């Protein structure tokens, strides 16, 4: 976006709805702008009172920003793939208890400052379980970082050498 676009005066020749959309986008109210555009294409706004319409626009902006924040957390976590706790197959015999996973999904261990180490034989789904818990944490607004043992040890080694451990 150019500097003059941010400070340029509102063009009075545009109709009121176009000016409103322009201002919403310039103020980075993208969720609200999207909802307002949808309302112009349908009869949704006509059935609402002004208070309800404003509340709806604000709710859509809130939802947009919440979803964007979750996507930023997921990108920052550096997951290798997408996984969710509800996708875990408990029929495979690997010593994984559904009740234990549900307790872990409460994320209380994170809130209490505890660590979680997932161990097991190769191919038992450790990375999948860690990723599923990580996605669940991100969806709950918790900043997450995904690393396998090799990556984690490498990062710790660099941090120790820099004196930032």
Image: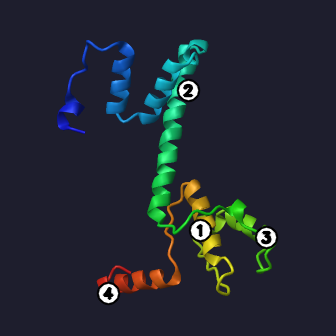
State the residue at coordinates (58%, 65%).
Answer: 134
Tag 3, which secondary structure? loop
User: In the drawing, does residue 11 fall left or right of residue 66?
Assistant: left
State the residue at coordinates (62%, 63%).
Answer: 83
Tag 2, which secondary structure? helix
Q: Check disc 3 and report the residue beneath it.
A: 90
Circles 3 and 1, Cβ within 8 Å, touching? The answer is no
Which sits earlier in the primary sequence, circle 4 or circle 1? 1
Of discs 2 and 4, which sits in the foreground?
2
Which sits earlier in the primary sequence, circle 3 or circle 1? 3
Q: CA distance from mark 4 to mark 1?
A: 29 Å
Q: CA distance from mark 2 to mark 3?
A: 41 Å
Q: CA distance from mark 1 to mark 2?
A: 34 Å
Which sits earlier in the primary sequence, circle 2 or circle 3? 2
Q: Position of residue 61 (x, y in %)?
A: 48, 34
Vertical position of residue 165 compared to residue 25: above or below: below
Crowd rating for badge 3 (residues with CA inside 10 Å; few <14, some 14–19, many 20+): few
Q: Quadrant of the N terminus?
A: top left
Circles 1 and 2, Cβ within 8 Å, touching? The answer is no
Q: Check disc 2 and report the residue beneath it.
A: 56
The single residue placed furthest to the left in the displayed view is 4
């Amino acid at each position: 976006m150019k500097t003059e676009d941010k400070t340029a005066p509102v063009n009075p020749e545009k109709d009121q709805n176009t000016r409103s959309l322009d201002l919403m986008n310039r103020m980075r109210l993208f969720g609200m702008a999207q909802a307002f555009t949808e309302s112009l294409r349908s009869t949704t706004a006509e059935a609402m009172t002004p208070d309800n319409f404003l509340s709806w626009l604000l709710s859509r902006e809130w939802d947009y920003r919440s979803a964007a924040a979750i996507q930023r957390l997921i990108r920052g976590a550096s997951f290798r793939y997408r996984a969710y706790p509800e996708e875990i197959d408990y029929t495979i015999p690997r010593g994984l208890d559904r009740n234990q996973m549900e307790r872990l999904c409460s994320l209380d261990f994170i809130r209490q400052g505890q660590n979680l180490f997932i161990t097991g034989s190769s191919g038992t789904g450790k990375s999948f379980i860690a990723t599923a818990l990580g996605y669940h944490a991100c969806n709950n607004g918790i900043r997450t970082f995904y690393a396998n043992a090799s990556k984690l040890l490498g990062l710790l080694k660099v941090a120790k050498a820099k004196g930032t451990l």
